Amino acid sequence: MDSEQQSATLSALARVRENAFFVLELDIACSRMEMERQAQKLLAMLELGLSSATTYSTPVGTGIRDADKVRLASARLRDPEKRLEEELWARIAKAEKPPPDPDADLGLEDLPKKPRPDAPWPNALPAFGWGRK
Amino acid sequence: MNAAFMGLLAAVLFTKVVIALFSARPKKQSKHPRPTDYRLFLIIVLLLLAGGLARLEEGPFRLNDVRSMATAVPLAMFIGMFVVWPLARHVFAPLGMVRTAYYVGYASWASPEDRIGRALMAGAIALHRKSQFDAESASFLEERITSQKGLRGGGIVAAAASAAARGDREGARALFLSIGQLDPRATTREAIHIAYEWLAADAAGRGAWQEVIDLGISSSHVGRSAWLLIQVAKRLLCKPDAPTRNALLLHWLFAPRRRHTFAIVERALSIEDNASMIEDEEENLPTVSDSEGPLAKALALHVALLSMKKPTAVDIVYTARSFDIAFEGDALLSLLQKRAEVIGASRPDDALRRFRDDVEDSLFHLLKAHSIALDDTKMDLGEFASAAQRRLRDETLAVIEALSDAVGNRAREKRALSAIDEWREFAALKMAYERGMRLGGPELRYLAFTKVHTDLSALAVWLFNERGERPIANAMLRFLLSEAQAVGDAEAIELQTKNVAIGV
Amino acid sequence: MLRSVSVRPQYVGIDLGTTNSTAAVFDGDKVTLVRNAQGGSLTPSVVRIDARGNVTVGDRARRFLESDPQNTRSELKRLMGTAEQVEFVAARVKKKPEEVAAEVLKSLRADVKEHLGFVPANAVIAVPALFEIPQSSATSEAARLAGFERVELIQEPVASALAAGWSAEDTSGAWLVYDLGGGTFDVSLLETRDGLLRVVGHDGDNFLGGRDFDWAIVDHVLRETSSAAGCTLSRADAALGPSLRKLKSVVEEAKIELTRAQEATIILPAAFEIGGRTIDVDVHITRDILNGLTAPLVDRSIDVCKRLVKAHGLTLDQIGRVVLVGGPTVMPGLRSRVKEALGAPFSEGLDPMTLVAQGAALYAATAGLDARPASAPEAAAHKLWLQYPAMTSDLTPHVVGRIAEGSGSKPAGLGKPVARSVRISRADGGFQTQDISLDGDGAFVALVELQTRRPNVFKVELFDGATERKPVPCSPSTFTIVQGLTIGDPPLSRTIGVALADDTVRVYFERGAPLPARRTFMHQTVETIARIQGQSPPILKIPIVQGELSRAHLCRLVGTLEIPGNGITATLPAGSQIELTLELDRGGHLSARAFIPALSQVFEKVAHLLVPDASPEVLTKSIADLRSRMGTLRVEATRRNSPNALGRLTFVECAIAEAERDVEAAKGGDADAAQKARRSLIDAEAILDEQDSEKKWPELDHEARLSLSAAASFVSEYGTKAEQKLLQEATDSVERARKDRDAVELERQLRVVRNLTHAAFNRHPESTKWLFEDAASELDRATDLVRAKKLVDDGRRAIDRNDMPALRTIVRELQKLMPADVRERQRGYESGVR
């Protein structure tokens, strides 16, 4: 994946990962005051470097929280027009897991996985004298 | 007998000299100087060498003997032609001696039409053998690459290797790949082999084994190193034409750097002959019930899609269709209207429009991130997927048009870049164009070709007619010809066939 | 944020106005206006530097404004961010506008010191909402030069709203802040719910203010005096400059008089001297005349208000009240006209002249920008890092704390904890937390309860054991939270983005985005930047623009990030990735950072631009160009009978006429009028561009229909299957583009259609003959007639012997001899080919 593709991946993820309700860990029915209070608490915790404030969970994985994100998220929720849109993105249904892997019952997933034969060969370029290992 | 043999040889060479003298005389003053014809010079050197060897038969060298010296000079020339280049390429370059490799390579008379290019190539290889990146040496080489006139394969490979040494893999890849566009007369086999060696190793390093296989079909074309990796890749991917273990061992024995490549060969050997490929763990979109409504379902699918490593076109279209369903009717708008009343918003329709745009934007970025082209002839795309596909096509086309515009405007305004930078610009345009072809299908190819043909022709003609950069100009015209054939533009085919035929 | 609370925090707000400046202080309880040495709360924004270099500011300087204008300067705010040098002739010094403004700020800072007893380190300065980046940046610079350590900017309407919101009892609903200052007009739409203030949006006119009212009266007086004296007096006449300044001052007084009286007389003996004859000014002016003269300007402000309300989906009857701010709003004519047009009642009891400064001081509190210099912590006490809102509408805000380690520069981490629990109690004894255990990081989060509308002082106590509860000294041991209003980060007044090669804008920060803001996007270069060491290397420019229009050239260029060819380590080919990050702080400082992955290089130097020069010559030429464009468009619009287009063009005509008047004033030395004209012309150009594309659309649409019909006949008969399919796709795209009125897309698709037609046409057995006949019919237009005639003869012979390859070559040669437009028409396969 080249840098342009990586940038596109981040853009695709942004709507969910940067959703104001996920960043502030709030329910979509929260009041404006609850939002302000939560944002103020998170900003204060981040300012003092409390590790418990630096991450948040989203349906697409863990997000890294910083003061900019919190301020941006609260600005979006302060504006009722923008909040409406944020609410829509936060209405995600719980997906049912895909059918379980038959091997899972045997506990095979816990065994160390053998590398695939077609895995990358990181030393390929150095092996031919191109660059350093 | 020896004297008689030498006399015969001298007679043959004398005759050749006479013939060469007459045939080398230009019949007509050409507008562009032809590359220097070294044949006559070569023959004189051989003649003197033969004379010198004949002298050897007669007794030992003496410094004060004119005949002895007459023997030493052609011998030195012989060494220059046949010994100096291997010294630069296989001794000084592996030792990381950038300047020495360059100067010794430059002193070699072998392959005179691209002497500087080859010297630069030796220097660039040496750059990679240094224990640390040497910015000063890189600048030394890059200055020479930039000032090189009459750019050919060697210079391009040197520029690519230099970019790779700086860590610009994408730039290096574009330049190494561009070697394939040159007329065989404009490059050397060695330059091609070096390019393919790097490309194969780069793809292997990324685990893109299919890309390795796609590089070539013969060892004479890609060189022994790349060919070894192609065979390894075939075994790793369990291709039907994969070599047997013994055959792979033979390839390895014939390839260079055996000690360094054994690890990957060993991995390939560990796979049974005729083994079948271990399939990727299948990634599937999860099942989502409708119980929470079509929007919640569409969003859940979207989230699952975002989490997939390699979503397929079908996955994306399925998700996009679920959004189509969510947007049907007035359900979403009335949901927003209710919420707007609660939170004091006044424009729920605007919020819905922005949400629609965001969904489309997200799908567009997914298509772009995974380089997926949607084919509406194979499936019904629906509104969102069609819109995302259209946007991908438009953006791809806009990039091609911007790059093409830059090339065309520069050519028309006669704002010259160095030859290697002209080539870089062409390589960038070509890469963007080819990416467009993959993503946009035949319609985009048609659109892009019209634009690129006009602009790139202007550049190529300027390079060919006025700047004497015939090899790279010819390569650009060859690219235009192949594209004209692909889109079936008869007029362009006719024009570029003639242009390409003029040669390098 | 480490605070010592030996005394209450003090917050300083400054209104750096065009005419007057004011400072206010908020102590958590009430807002107090700072008095200057003369005892007034308004300090005229006038600076005088005499021959000995002595600087005088305020009233004392204002006295010299008429008598010694060469060494006394006013209205500096309007020059902020421009390259205009302010000259003080006697002292022989030239200063930048921000350097002169810094003198006003220094004076205010000294007044605040007198008021508070210490030199304020930090302050909030109010700026017009529509100030652009260079203007905001210059204001921050002025504050820095004045000695402030930290300064934040707030938009004037937000400040006014804060002050109005703080004073009002019932503040729920939507309201407008109508702020007409000396030089700028701002209107803001605000909404308050439960003490939470929100700026819904704002709009304004950077070049409309009380000063324009004065000039309108001056123009009237000049007209009256000219007709009475039988001569021509014009603001364009540079020789009248000093006299005009005097007249303006008298006019200003008359205008103020007319707010109380029904009529006034403007008398200025020997005001002008024309051809050796002195001319007196003696003009009687009534309130009705004044209202008539200023009505167009007031209407302009009302239009802006209506536009703002409409843009946010509201109607005027939903506006609860209007807050008037600024000196000119005391004019009775203006008040009645605005009230009539907007319908909502005015907020009473607010001082329009000082509201902004009061709001700025309140904002300093919400931003926690205490003016006191940082105090040294108490000895032998453990340092405590505390975070809490200095002012909030929340009755139960959070307080977060952490024990600092060692020197206090870092929060505590591993090691033996100095305390195990914390307790917070309100000074009045009405509230106390439980003992809260400190976590592994030595931190705690607590909810505290506030009393409404007052400063709440809290005491913090640390204890070292859970059972023994032995107190641990800490610093600070108290802190104050004011219960009042909550306001979000200051919103960005105009959209900021990067201009792209195709004249579009990639938006980084939308209007209303909270400041500070930071955003990163990936861009691609479109041209190769060669690495060249030398005097004039190629430069990759990344222009940063500010404005709402989608076309980059119509937005204001506010900065440029440059990547020079002699600064890169290797050539940067076209198509290279550039990761660009823009950052904007609350002081209006814009920074940009470009990372080039291919070179692993970072570029950060941004050339901050000034407000562009607007010389009267350039403006006159722009006006002539716009007039000519407008003439063509008017003819077109009349021909098309489009009342909508004609209406827009009339609007442009008015704007151009006004710009002409401003250019006249600019010729008389009024640099500010020149800037105003420049902005008006940019807006006019945007409307003409829009009209241009409107005009072109029917032609393009017609062309699309013709091209599709020609393509359908040729491609269906002579096209390959693939071409037929492509044509079908292109036809669909053409229809879509026509439906969306997307001209760029339509032109693209027409290119495909023409190419397909071209390919199919070439397969027609007679196509070469048709092309030949067509070229032959244009013979008289050939650039080389003799050669063309010979080619036509050769062509005829080729037709006779049916030698089509030869004929094709001849056609190509013939086409080369044709002028460009003929060739173009043939390539495009438009009418005339058959």
Image: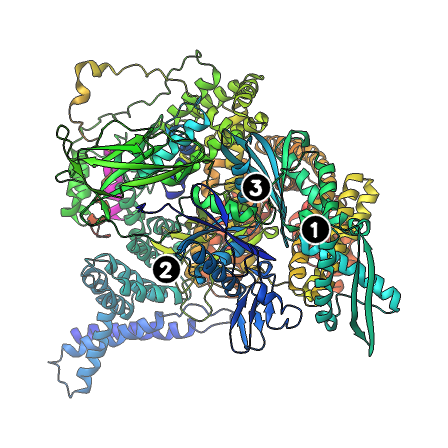
User: What's the residue at 64%, 59% (across, down)?
Assistant: C675
Pointers 2 and 3 within a single chain? no
Task: From the image, tell me which residue sits under label 1.
Answer: C684
Q: Is residue C143 visible?
A: yes
Callout 3: helix, strand or loop? helix
The chain that hosts pointer 3 is: B
In which quadrant of the rendered image does the C terminus of chain C lie? top right
Above or below — where is C79 with respect to B46?
above
Q: Quadrant of residue C646?
A: top right
Q: Would residue B463 be found to the left or right of residue B97 on screen?
A: right
Q: Is residue B234 magenta?
A: yes
The chain that hosts pointer 2 is: C
User: What's the residue at 87%, 69% (across, down)?
Assistant: C229
Task: From the image, tell me which residue sits under label 2.
Answer: C570
Of badges 2 and 3, nearer the viewer stands 2
Question: Toward the viewer: C752 or C452?
Answer: C452
* Chain part drawn in magenta: B223-236
Task: From the image, tell me which residue sits under label 3.
Answer: B447
Q: Residues within 10 Å of mark 2 (few under 14, many from 20)?
A: many
Amino acid on which the number 2 mark rests in the picture: Ala
Question: Toward the viewer: B145 or C43?
Answer: C43
